[in-house]
Image (cartoon, rainbow, N blue to C red):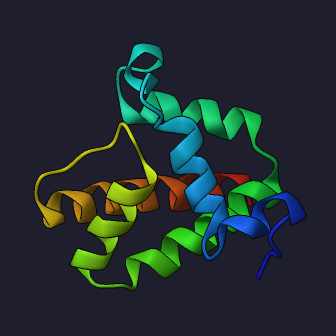
Amino acid sequence: MHPEPEYLRAIGDMTALKDFLGGWYHQDAWNEYRIDEERWRAFQQSASAEELARLREQVERLAARSTDEVHHFIQTNADALYFEEPQMSRDWLEDFRSWLREIHETRT
């Protein structure tokens, strides 16, 4: 497990994921990137291996939760990522999870 950096500890559990969602899915996010994968690649280019590992671990932890919990977490922490149905949040998380796994495998 990768420890949280001191500056993120104040926002509670799954801080790397909350920081990612808040920073990359803010209210003007769709003006900068048209599709999720563009945003994810931009994050990958700016992130350290440690940051990616911490994010990957937290996405795995969130994926183990119920679909309603996933939906609530995403709606609470991402201003520009809105899904009407809980399953849509789950689908987004699974796409992101697959992408994180793919880039991890190409790095190792």
Give the image quarter of residue 76.
bottom left
Q: Position of residue 28 (x, y in %)?
A: 44, 22
Please identify the residue farthest to the top as the structure is shown: 31
Q: Is residue 37 above or below residue 7?
A: above
> Can the viewer see residue 65?
yes
Q: Quadrant of the C terminus?
A: bottom right
Q: Position of residue 61 (x, y in %)?
A: 51, 81
Residue shown at 65%/73% (left/top)? 12
Residue shown at 43%/35% (left/top)? 37
Horizontal relation, residue 42 to residue 5: left or right: left
Q: Is residue 40 above or below residue 6?
A: above
Horizontal relation, residue 34 to residue 39: left or right: left
Horizontal relation, residue 50 to residue 17: left or right: right
Please identify the residue farthest to the right as the structure is shown: 6
Give the image quarter of residue 41.
top right
Q: Quadrant of the N terminus?
A: bottom right
In depth, the one of 72 and 64 nearer the eye is 72
> Can the viewer see residue 105?
no
In depth, the one of 9 and 106 nearer the eye is 9
